Every structure is written in C-alpha cells, then in structure tokens.
Image (cartoon, coloured by chain):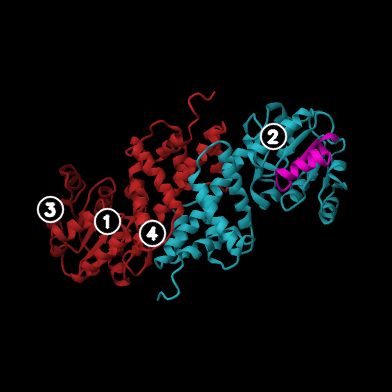
Chain colours: A red, B cyan
Amino acid sequence: MPTTPLSIAFVGLGAMGAPMAENLIKRQFRVTGFDMRESAREALVAAGGHAADSAKAAASGADALVLMVVNAAQARAVLFEAGALAALSDGAVVMLMATCPPGEVEAIAAEVVRSGRHFVDSPVSGGVVGAKAATLSIMVGAPQESFDKARPVLDAMGDKVFHVGERPGQGATVKTVNQLLCGVHIAVAAEALSLAEKAGIDGRVLFEIMGGSAASSWMLRDRGPRMHEPDPTVASAVDIFVKDLGIVLDAGRAAKTALPLAAAAHQMFLAASGLGHGARDDSQVVRAYRALNAKPANDP
Amino acid sequence: MPTTPLSIAFVGLGAMGAPMAENLIKRQFRVTGFDMRESAREALVAAGGHAADSAKAAASGADALVLMVVNAAQARAVLFEAGALAALSDGAVVMLMATCPPGEVEAIAAEVVRSGRHFVDSPVSGGVVGAKAATLSIMVGAPQESFDKARPVLDAMGDKVFHVGERPGQGATVKTVNQLLCGVHIAVAAEALSLAEKAGIDGRVLFEIMGGSAASSWMLRDRGPRMHEPDPTVASAVDIFVKDLGIVLDAGRAAKTALPLAAAAHQMFLAASGLGHGARDDSQVVRAYRALNAKPANDP
C-alpha cells in the first residue's frame, strides 16, 4: 500500500516512547530514533531499529514522524528549531502523541500543515504497561485523510484507536478530560480515606467495601491500596498530576470553562508536591490530606 | 437458636424498606410493619407480613426493630416520642439502616443502650435493585455481641455485610464515605463532559472511551449515558445528593476534617437543585455545569 508510511522517525525514547518504537519495529516498520540519551539510542538499535544523532537526521526523508517528547515546548523545538519538520518527505505525517495542552496542539498543527505535511493529534493513555503490550488507547483529532495515513502506525502501538474529531486539539482535549477524571478520582479516594481514618475506620477495609460498590473507580482500586504504603514504588509521580491537572485547568481557562473539582484536586497535588512528595507515587497525594486532617499529636 | 430474633418490627416501608421487609418474610421471620401510608401497610400484609397502626404497636414485644426511615429525626421520633423503644422486649436489637449523620447515630445509640437494648448502626448501599434482590451492602458499626444478634436479620437483606467497627457511628461513617465518593464521581463525570462539549467532542464517544480506561468509575458508566438524555427516568434524585453530601460535610465539620472535593461537588448539586432540577435524576447535575459553561447564544 503506497499510503502506508514505511519509514518512521521516532523522537523521545523514554519509558513510554522506547516500547512504542519497539512495537513499530516488530510490525516491520523501518524506525529511526532519536533521544538525547545515548543509552536510549543504543537500546533502540539493539531492538532492531536505527539511531540518528539528531532529530533532523532521524526525520530526513521519513514518511512519518512520531513525537513522544515531554511537552509541547519540546515538540516545537524538534519540529521548528532542530529542523525535523523541513527534513521530512513531502506529504509526511507528523504524529504528536505526548500529552500537550489542546491550544498548543492546534497552533503546532497549523504550522505543520502550512509546510505541506499532515498533522495527527494523537495522545495516548494506558501507561508503560499499555505501551509495552501495544494496548494503548489513542485519541485522535485529525482530518479523515490524515487519520487514514496514520492509522497503520497507530494500530501498531495501541488497540483502542478513537477518531474523536476532525480538528487537531480535539484528541488532546479528550486526553485532557481523561486526566481530569484520573486526577480527581485519585484525590477523592485520598479524601475519602482521610475522613474514614479520622473516625477510626481501617482504610483497607474501607477500600475493600468501596471497591465493590457504586463508589468504585478504576483509580480507587489501583491507587487505593498504595495509599496505605509509606513509600510505594512509583508508577506515576505526584508531579505528573501537578503538570497534567495544570494542563486541564489551562484548557479550561482557554475555553472559559469552570472546572471546580479539577481545580480543588490540583490544589491537593500541588500541596503534596510542596510538602516534598512530588517525586513519590501519585497515590501519595494522601499525604496532603493527612497533613490537613491528621489527629493532633496530643489526641489519644 | 434462642439468640436469633424471630419477631421483627419494621418501620419505614418505602421504596427500599418494602422489599427489605419482604425479604425478611421470605426468610421466615415474623414481620410486623408500620408506615404512615396505608397502602404500604396493605402491601406488606399481601406479602405475608403483619401491619400495625403505630410504630409502638409494631414494636410491642418484638425481638428486633428495623428502622428504614428517611432520616435521624424520624428515627428519634419513632424510638423516643412514639414509644417504640420502650415497647420492645428486653435485650431487643435496634437496627438503624437509614443514612444518617454519624454523630446523630452515636447519640441515638447511647440512648438505646441506656434502655437495655442493643443498637446496631447498619446503613446500606445498593439501591432499590439491591433491596429487592437481597444483595445490599450493609456497613455495621456495633459491639461484637450486638452484631452477632443482628447478623441473621442483616443476612436476609444483604449479601455483603461488613463489620467495620465496634462503635455505633462507624457504619454511618463508611456509608458517608461511600456517598462522598459517589457524589464526587457523578459531579466530576458531568464536569468532564462539560469541558469536552465545549471543545465540540461528542459526549457519547467521550464516555465510551473513558468508560474503558483508567478514567472510569462505576458512576461514570452508570450515570454518564443518562447525562445525554433530556429528562431520564429518576433512579435517584439530585436532592438525594444535596442531602447526602450535606451529611458528608456535616460529618467533616464534626470531625474537623477538610473535604475540598466533596464541598465543591455539593455546590454543583445545590446549584442544580436551585435551578429547579432537584427532583430530576441525579445525572442531571450536568445541568448546573451546562448553565455555567454553555456556549453563549451568539456563538456560532
């Protein structure tokens, strides 16, 4: 199929990007990767890919560019400052898969399209587990033609590909909404635990009951048990939700949309980070609640 | 077994109480019911129970009294003003199964115990569906001896009976925490929908994606689809959460516990009620978000 991109540049080989790139290699795409860290480039080569020593070199003549960088600023730097966009073949497809503010995605998309390339807004959810197993959810905002071109590449990385709208930024909005729900669900589980602990209820029993009732959420079942551990292994850090709920609230500001629960949850993640727990597992937002609602020291 | 209560007074034969009383009858308990509404008393008799024309008459000589009334004030009225407590046999068990503030439950318990009866704080979750199918979750705060006496009666109405603590009020606290989570989960689903709709995302697609991701909650999957209906059949009303999140916040005040997410969610249910939607299905809290975040009329 001539419309299938065969040669793919992949920039950002981190905890998510590396296994995503490897899944492309397994599906017989020719993948040339770039990451600032040499060890990440070497790992890609060991997995059967190719390494380039700049983003521009990786993109040179490629049919597609996947961006799994940290944020929108890095995406801009790769595309416009490092010259990756201009190095792509004419009509190539740029897939921005990092979590970025919807407004930024729209602006980047406009610039990419002006250069004669396709832009596919395609953030993911499913974490490192989903990235490894190629079971990511991918939320796409793109015109139909651009989506069709990107589809084989996306299908190699995720098994739930949703075309949520024709406008770039709409994929980012759905991802933003996803983070809004996830962030509030983690914080409210901690809030519930905090009230129960104050009344002398065993938190483990509480979450056992709540996890099997109408009060359940995916996050309560996943993060709840880790709220009882003093310092659990980090699946995703408090500071990720400081950032992501920040993106949620920026999107709300841009759209002039009031988001009272997201705003309140953000305060609790900010407080947890300010208390020195930003690098801990995000379940540790419970520490902000415990700081607020601890029994006084002289309480029996 | 001499410790099994055989003769049960049941006060409050509403949407929940009536099927709960019928499940007791099916398990061969002798049930004498009272409700202000004659039709409710007649329905109990038709189901094989007995009707009394006052709460005191129903309680007369009974081994147990189940209270499935509207609130703590009604429980007090039945027990202390209408004379049901004094009419019970010595050592009888009073089961308060309505959703009441933990502090009120504690106070009522103290008075019941002073009269020489057992008190079992035992609120339920699972709704009318659970009440009919005898699959309620029952959260019990009571001393072990009292719990043991109540157990056969509770087992006839629910299949998930949790003894969460030895103190009356602890069952009510767990129920309160349950309502905290449920209320916030409904409100945040509406908040998420509100942000997505502003960006032109189809809400049905949004909830399909979120319902299968880490962003999911039981309430999002249950109430989400009803947020797209203009006036869905009422499973539980907005005003129930106005009341129940009020109880949550009262419990927080009593325990001096900050509950920022519950407080924000309560505001949205209050606003929905204030906009005239208090009797609608609780999914219609989304109307408060739409009132806040609707596109202006002159927006294209």
Mark whose residue sits in front, 2 or 3: 2
Q: Position of residue A300 (x, y in %)?
A: 54, 23
| SS of the residue under disc 2 | helix
What label does residue A27 carry, if any?
A: 1
Mark whose residue sits in front, 3 or 4: 4
Residue at image mark 4: A252
Of A93 and A284, the residue lying toward us: A284
What label does residue B107 carry, if any?
A: 2
Q: Position of residue B94 (x, y in %)?
A: 76, 36
Instruction: Tell me which segment is drawn in magenta.
Output: B64-86
Give yes or no for contact between labels 2 and 3 (Cβ–Cβ under 8 Å). no
Residue at image mark 3: A54
Q: Chain of mark 2?
A: B
Q: Residue at x 20, y 70 (%)?
A: A91
Q: Amino acid at mark 3?
A: Ser
Q: Amino acid at mark 4?
A: Gly
Q: Is residue B290 above or below residue A289?
A: below
What label does residue A147 carry, if any?
A: none
Q: Is residue A67 above or below residue A231?
A: below
Give yes or no for contact between labels 2 and 1 (Cβ–Cβ under 8 Å). no
Q: Residues within 10 Å of mark 4 (few under 14, many from 20)?
A: many
Residues under labels 2 and 3: Cα distance?
71 Å
Q: Residue at x 59, y 40 (%)?
A: B251
Mark whose residue sits in front, 2 or 1: 2
For the residues beneath circles 3 and 4, the answer to whether they share a chain is yes
Tell me, yes or no, if residue A131 can be seen here: yes
